[in-house]
Amino acid sequence: MSKRPWPVAITSARGVVEYRIRPRRGTVGGFILRIVERTYMNGAGDDTDGDEREAGGRGGFDDDRSEAETEWDTEHATRDGERDERRRITVDLADSNADTDAEPTSSPPPSTPDPDDRDPDSGPDPGPNAVRNWAVLLLGLAVVSFVTAAVTVSTGDDVLPVIGAIVVGVTFAAIAVVSVQRAPWLLEWLDAAWIEHRRYVWFSTGLFAFGIVLGFLLLLAGVNLFELVLELLEEELFPELEDEEFELTASFFIVNNSQPFLLSIVGALSVGVLTAAIMLFNGIIVGNVVGALVGETGIDYVIVGLVPHGVFELAALFIAAGVGFRLLYRFAERIIGYRDAFLTKPYLLRTTALVVFAWLMLVLAAFVEAYITPELLEMLFAERLEGLEDDAQTP
C-alpha cells in the first residue's frame, strides 16, 4: 500500500510550523545560532585548530580580564590607602588638639625664674653681659674721678684733693681692666650681688621717695626744717663750722656720709627699723629743705647744687640699705627653714664686693660735692648768691 501523501492543509501547517520554529536571519536568536554554527559546526573537522582558537579566544579574554582586575585592584588599593591616610591624619590631628587643649591644665607655661626661687644657698647667676656692663660702668666712674681731679687742680692750691680724686679714678679703672683681663669672676660677683639685692635697693629708694613727700607736706603745714638747721648753727651745735679756717673738704663728707652708710647695713640687727628710719629721715630732710630753697633760690639752683654729687651719694646709700634689708630677709628665711645657712661664703664674697663698690661711689660723691658743686654754683649763680647775701645782712 502506497504511503498516502500528507494533505495539503497538513503539509501547509507543517511548513508553517517549521517556518515558525526555524530561526530567521533577522532575529537575535538567528544571529546567535549563526555565530555558534560558524564557530563549532564549520570547524568540527579540525579539532586542533578549534581547540587552539578556543584556547586563544579564552586566553585573550582571561588576559584582558586579568589586566582589568589588576587595574581595578591597584585603583582600589590606592583609594583604600588614601582613605586610610586621611583617616590616620584626622586621628593624629584630633590627638594633637586634645594634647594642646589638655596641656595648660596639666603643665602651666614656664615663667621667668625668680633669682630667689632657685637654690637659696647657691645665689643667682650673673647676666650674660655682666663683665662688659660692669667694666663700662667702672670706666665711666674713673673718668668722672679724673675730671674731678682736673677741676680741683684748676680751682685750688691744695694737692691732696687732687691726689685723692686721682686715686679713686685709678681704683675704678684698675678694677675694670684687671677684671676683664685676669679676673672676670669679680665683675660676675658684682652682677650676681646686684641681681640678689636690687629689689631691696628699689624698696629703699621707695622709702626715701616717701620721705621726700612727707618732708614737702610738713613744709606746707608750716614746719620749715631749713630754718631749724640755721637755728642749730646759731646755737653752735656744730662748733667746727664756726672755725674760720674750716672748709668743707672731701674727707669731711666721707666721714659724715659713711656713718649712715654703715648704719643702713647694720640696721638689719634692729629688724630693719633703723635702716628704714635712715631712709625716711633723709628723705624728709631733702624734701623739706629743697622745698624751702626752691622758693628762695629757684629750682635750677637746687638741681645744680644736688644732682652732680647726689647721683653717686644716694645710689651708694640705697645699695647699703638694700644690703641691710636683704640680710634681714635671709635671716627670716633661715628661721622658717627655707635656707640651710644664714650666711654662706659665696654670699659674703659677692656682697662684700658690692658694698666696696658702693662705698667707692660714696667717696667719689664726696670729692664732687666738695670741689665740683661749689664751683658750678659760683659759676652759674654768682649774682644770685650775692643778692641772697645782701638780703641776709639787711636787718
Image: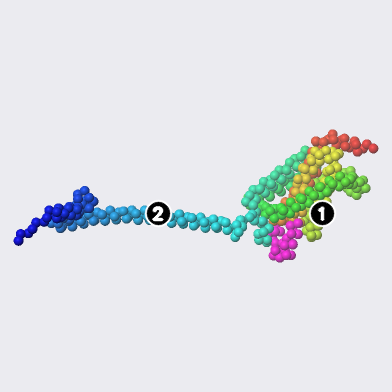
* Magenta highlight: main SS: helix
Q: Residue at x 43, y 55 (%)?
A: 83
In the image, 134: left or right of 62?
Answer: right
Disc sitting over residue 277 in the figure: 1
Determine which quarter of the picture holds residue 373: top right
In the image, 51: left or right of 153?
Answer: left
Pick whichever, 95 or 373, lies toward us: 95
* Mark 2 lies on residue: 79
The percent coordinates of residue 305 (x first, y second) are: 80, 41
CA distance for labels 1 and 2: 84 Å
Badge 1 or badge 2: first in the primary sequence: 2
Q: Is residue 340 magenta?
A: yes
Q: Residue at x 64, y 56 (%)?
A: 113
Quarter that holds the N terminus: bottom left
Q: Amino acid at mark 2?
A: Arg
Asked if residue 259 can be seen in this view, the reply is no
Q: Residue at x 77, y 43 (%)?
A: 307
Determine which quarter of the picture holds residue 158: top right
Q: Is residue 34 above or below residue 387?
A: below
Pick whichever, 4 or 73, lies toward us: 4
Give the residues drawn in magenta, as a range: 325-349
Q: Residue at x 81, y 39 (%)?
A: 299
Question: Mark 1 or mark 2, which is nearer to you?
Answer: 2
Q: Amino acid at mark 1?
A: Ala
The percent coordinates of residue 213 (x first, y second) are: 81, 47
